[in-house]
Image: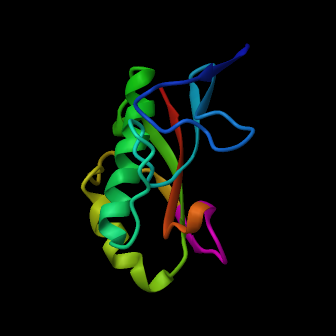
Amino acid sequence: MEKKIIRTEQAPAPIGPYNQAVQFGNMLFISGQIALDPKDGTLYQGDIQIETEKVMQNLKGILDAVGMDFSHVIKTSIFLMDMGKFAEVNEVYGRYFDEATAPARETVQVAGLPKGVQVEISMIAAR
Protein backbone atom coordinates (compact mmCIF):
# COMPACT_ATOMS: atom_id res chain seq x y z
CA MET A 1 0.00 0.00 0.00
CA GLU A 2 1.04 3.53 -0.65
CA LYS A 3 0.20 6.59 1.39
CA LYS A 4 -1.72 9.34 -0.36
CA ILE A 5 -1.40 12.96 0.72
CA ILE A 6 -4.75 14.73 1.02
CA ARG A 7 -4.97 18.42 0.22
CA THR A 8 -8.19 20.39 -0.04
CA GLU A 9 -9.23 24.02 -0.09
CA GLN A 10 -12.14 23.05 2.20
CA ALA A 11 -9.73 23.16 5.17
CA PRO A 12 -6.89 25.51 6.11
CA ALA A 13 -3.48 24.93 4.59
CA PRO A 14 -0.95 23.46 7.03
CA ILE A 15 1.02 25.98 9.10
CA GLY A 16 4.04 23.71 9.38
CA PRO A 17 5.76 20.69 7.85
CA TYR A 18 2.75 18.36 7.78
CA ASN A 19 -0.28 17.60 5.59
CA GLN A 20 -3.98 18.10 6.22
CA ALA A 21 -4.43 14.34 6.06
CA VAL A 22 -2.82 11.14 4.88
CA GLN A 23 -4.77 8.23 3.45
CA PHE A 24 -3.28 4.76 3.79
CA GLY A 25 -5.41 1.99 2.37
CA ASN A 26 -8.89 2.40 3.83
CA MET A 27 -7.60 4.55 6.72
CA LEU A 28 -7.57 8.36 6.84
CA PHE A 29 -5.41 10.17 9.39
CA ILE A 30 -6.45 13.83 9.76
CA SER A 31 -4.02 16.28 11.33
CA GLY A 32 -5.21 18.42 14.22
CA GLN A 33 -7.45 21.24 13.05
CA ILE A 34 -7.86 24.63 14.67
CA ALA A 35 -10.38 27.41 14.05
CA LEU A 36 -8.79 28.88 10.92
CA ASP A 37 -11.05 29.86 8.03
CA PRO A 38 -9.81 27.99 4.94
CA LYS A 39 -10.89 30.80 2.59
CA ASP A 40 -9.18 33.82 4.11
CA GLY A 41 -7.12 32.54 7.04
CA THR A 42 -9.22 34.32 9.66
CA LEU A 43 -8.52 32.89 13.11
CA TYR A 44 -11.63 32.56 15.27
CA GLN A 45 -10.88 33.04 18.96
CA GLY A 46 -12.79 33.92 22.07
CA ASP A 47 -15.99 31.86 22.09
CA ILE A 48 -15.05 28.18 22.55
CA GLN A 49 -18.25 26.99 20.85
CA ILE A 50 -17.56 29.09 17.75
CA GLU A 51 -13.97 27.80 17.70
CA THR A 52 -15.19 24.21 18.01
CA GLU A 53 -17.75 24.67 15.22
CA LYS A 54 -15.03 26.03 12.90
CA VAL A 55 -12.76 23.11 13.79
CA MET A 56 -15.51 20.59 13.04
CA GLN A 57 -16.25 22.30 9.71
CA ASN A 58 -12.55 22.05 8.78
CA LEU A 59 -12.58 18.35 9.66
CA LYS A 60 -15.75 17.92 7.59
CA GLY A 61 -14.02 19.55 4.62
CA ILE A 62 -11.20 17.02 4.76
CA LEU A 63 -13.61 14.09 5.14
CA ASP A 64 -15.64 15.41 2.18
CA ALA A 65 -12.49 15.64 0.06
CA VAL A 66 -12.08 11.86 0.22
CA GLY A 67 -15.76 10.94 0.05
CA MET A 68 -16.16 10.25 3.75
CA ASP A 69 -18.31 11.74 6.48
CA PHE A 70 -18.43 11.69 10.28
CA SER A 71 -19.90 8.17 10.29
CA HIS A 72 -16.50 6.96 9.05
CA VAL A 73 -14.62 8.45 12.02
CA ILE A 74 -13.30 5.78 14.37
CA LYS A 75 -11.10 7.85 16.72
CA THR A 76 -10.79 11.49 17.73
CA SER A 77 -8.39 13.36 19.96
CA ILE A 78 -9.48 16.65 21.49
CA PHE A 79 -6.90 19.02 22.96
CA LEU A 80 -8.20 21.78 25.24
CA MET A 81 -6.49 24.68 26.90
CA ASP A 82 -9.05 24.59 29.72
CA MET A 83 -10.83 21.39 30.75
CA GLY A 84 -13.45 23.66 32.34
CA LYS A 85 -14.68 24.27 28.76
CA PHE A 86 -15.25 20.54 28.16
CA ALA A 87 -19.06 20.71 28.30
CA GLU A 88 -19.21 23.57 25.78
CA VAL A 89 -16.91 21.76 23.35
CA ASN A 90 -18.76 18.48 23.86
CA GLU A 91 -22.08 20.15 23.05
CA VAL A 92 -20.86 21.28 19.62
CA TYR A 93 -18.89 18.08 18.95
CA GLY A 94 -21.92 15.96 19.82
CA ARG A 95 -23.98 17.53 17.01
CA TYR A 96 -21.80 15.70 14.50
CA PHE A 97 -22.23 12.20 15.94
CA ASP A 98 -25.02 10.02 17.23
CA GLU A 99 -24.75 6.99 19.50
CA ALA A 100 -24.58 4.63 16.53
CA THR A 101 -21.65 6.44 14.86
CA ALA A 102 -19.77 8.07 17.74
CA PRO A 103 -16.05 7.23 17.61
CA ALA A 104 -13.64 6.37 20.38
CA ARG A 105 -12.19 9.56 21.86
CA GLU A 106 -9.88 11.12 24.37
CA THR A 107 -9.90 14.69 25.60
CA VAL A 108 -6.86 16.17 27.26
CA GLN A 109 -5.93 19.54 28.68
CA VAL A 110 -2.69 20.94 27.29
CA ALA A 111 -0.36 23.80 28.21
CA GLY A 112 -0.56 25.46 24.78
CA LEU A 113 -1.95 25.15 21.26
CA PRO A 114 -0.95 26.71 17.92
CA LYS A 115 -1.79 30.40 17.49
CA GLY A 116 -3.18 30.56 21.03
CA VAL A 117 -6.43 28.73 20.19
CA GLN A 118 -8.52 27.01 22.85
CA VAL A 119 -9.26 23.74 21.03
CA GLU A 120 -7.66 21.44 18.46
CA ILE A 121 -9.16 18.18 17.18
CA SER A 122 -7.60 15.37 15.12
CA MET A 123 -9.34 12.32 13.67
CA ILE A 124 -8.82 8.87 12.27
CA ALA A 125 -11.45 7.56 9.83
CA ALA A 126 -11.89 4.32 7.91
CA ARG A 127 -14.08 2.89 5.16
Report the side of 6 relative to 63 (left or right). right
Q: Position of residue 104 (x, y in %)?
A: 49, 55
Q: Residue 99 appears in which quarter of the rendering?
A: bottom left
Q: Residue at x 39, y 33 (%)?
A: 61
For residue 108, above or below residue 11: below
For residue 65, above or below residue 94: above
Q: Is residue 102 visible?
A: no
For residue 83, above or below residue 14: below
Report the side of 87 relative to 3 (left or right). left
Along the viewing direction, whichever of 8 and 122 lies nearer the viewer: 8
Q: Position of residue 58 (x, y in %)?
A: 41, 42
Q: Residue at x 58, y 62 (%)?
A: 115
Along the viewing direction, whichever of 80 and 26 lies nearer the viewer: 80
Report the label total. 0
Q: Residue reaching furthest bottom?
A: 84
Q: Is residue 127 visible?
A: yes
Q: Is residue 108 magenta?
A: yes
Numbered range of the magenta stretch: 106-114
Q: Position of residue 26 (x, y in %)?
A: 56, 22
Quarter of the image for the N terminus: give it: top right
Q: Residue 4 appears in which quarter of the rendering?
A: top right
Q: Is residue 41 magenta?
A: no
Along the viewing direction, whichever of 62 and 71 lies nearer the viewer: 62
Q: Residue at x 75, y 38 (%)?
A: 17
Q: How is the image coloured?
A: rainbow
Q: Residue at x 49, y 39 (%)?
A: 12
